[in-house]
Image (cartoon, rainbow, N blue to C red):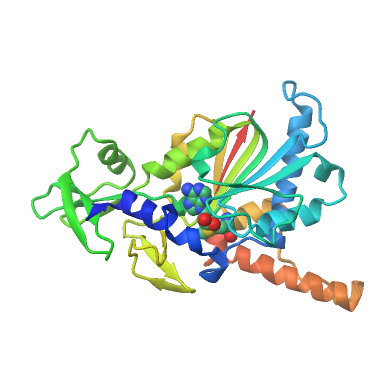
Amino acid sequence: MALPWSEAWRRASTGDGGFWRHEIPSSHFATSTGPVLAQAMVRLLQDVSARIAGGQSAGPAGDGDLDVIDVGAGDGTLLNAMADILEGTELGARCRLRGVDVRPRPPTLRADVEWSEGDAEDLPASGIRGLVMAHEWLDEVPLDIIQRDARGIDRLVLVGEDGREILGDPVPPGDPLAAWAAEWWPLREIGDRAEVGNTRDLAWDRLCASVRIGAVVASDYARYGRGSTLRGYRGGNAVLPVPDGTCNLTADVTIGSCVAATAIRRVSTCTQREALASLGVSGELPDPTTMDGEAYARDLSRAFSARALRAPGGRGAFRWLRADVG
Ligand SMILES: C[S@@+](CC[C@H](N)C(=O)[O-])C[C@H]1O[C@@H](n2cnc3c(N)ncnc32)[C@H](O)[C@@H]1O
């Protein structure tokens, strides 16, 4: 049976037998998570902690009073690396690290990191004090597609489990999908398609609303043009986006609509390159004359990882969304 893309995608991704019920991200693609991103996130956490400590309404600082939540935490790589950096520090004693993912608790997760197996929608609706992160998660939030037919009518695209599409009902101008497209991805010609990002807007707004005081950061593939960005990944290769649970489905995020979707006023956006630079990740090569061989090898490897995350035509072009709350 052909379904609207958002429904077919949700079933194929997080539904029973869906892709993420039996797969881990690292089997299919590399993401930005690792020690370098962890270093940047700890730096951001220090800022958040200082702001909370300086706030009037936040209450006194104490053990476990800072939440650090990774939404769509995958195999827990980022949380493990952050916990390694925070171990034995005053800031570390104040943090409760927790991953949220539809996948079960990863066996490699450190014992001091908590895990909630479930949908990101189950996050508390409000009250979090600390840092909420969502790296390469918004592009996973299923969306609908509308297409202008041969008569110039905009219609909902339906898709079967084999990936074959048909055009469904007309989408009237008052419909939320049509309203979103009119503002963020207007259809102009016959055959034009829009990937309607209202579900990502809601997801981002929900993350922002969950925080009472602190910050929310999401980083992702951003949509820049008008062409289709829906694609599949399997085993390291790009494949046709077929909603049958055998590939990861993703589509770029319309960042502007997310920014506009939340009532939080302090929302900023920048490239990953800029965000990492502002958090002290430079990619500068170490000086071999100032350290022993082991330290040099470690710092060199870290510098190359930082350069990969900052590469202007690659991961450095990812877009970060940041909301400062409270
Ligand atoms: C592309 S991976 C990114 C993993 C990790 N953040 C990283 O950057 O390596 C997306 C992750 O989001 C999880 N996920 C997708 N939809 C979700 C949902 N609705 N609720 C919770 N987790 C979800 C998947 O299981 C997967 O682990």
Residue furthest toward the front?
A: 16
* Image quadrant containing the C terminus: top right
- Return the residue nearer the eye: 285 or 109: 109
Q: Nearer the viewer, residue 219 or 248?
A: 248
* Residue 318 seen from this side: no
> With respect to residue 22, does 14 lie above or below?
above
On the image, the x and y values in percent for residue 62 come to: 82, 32
Farthest residue in the left direction? Answer: 151
* Residue positioned 70% across, 39% down in the render: 67
Residue 98 visible in this rendered orientation of the protein = yes
Left or right: 103 as drawn, with respect to 107: left
170 left or right of 91?
Answer: left
Q: Residue at x 29, y 43 (%)?
A: 181
Rendered image quadrant of residue 182: top left
- Specify the quadrant of the image occupied by residue 35: bottom right
x, y (%) of residue 233?
43, 68
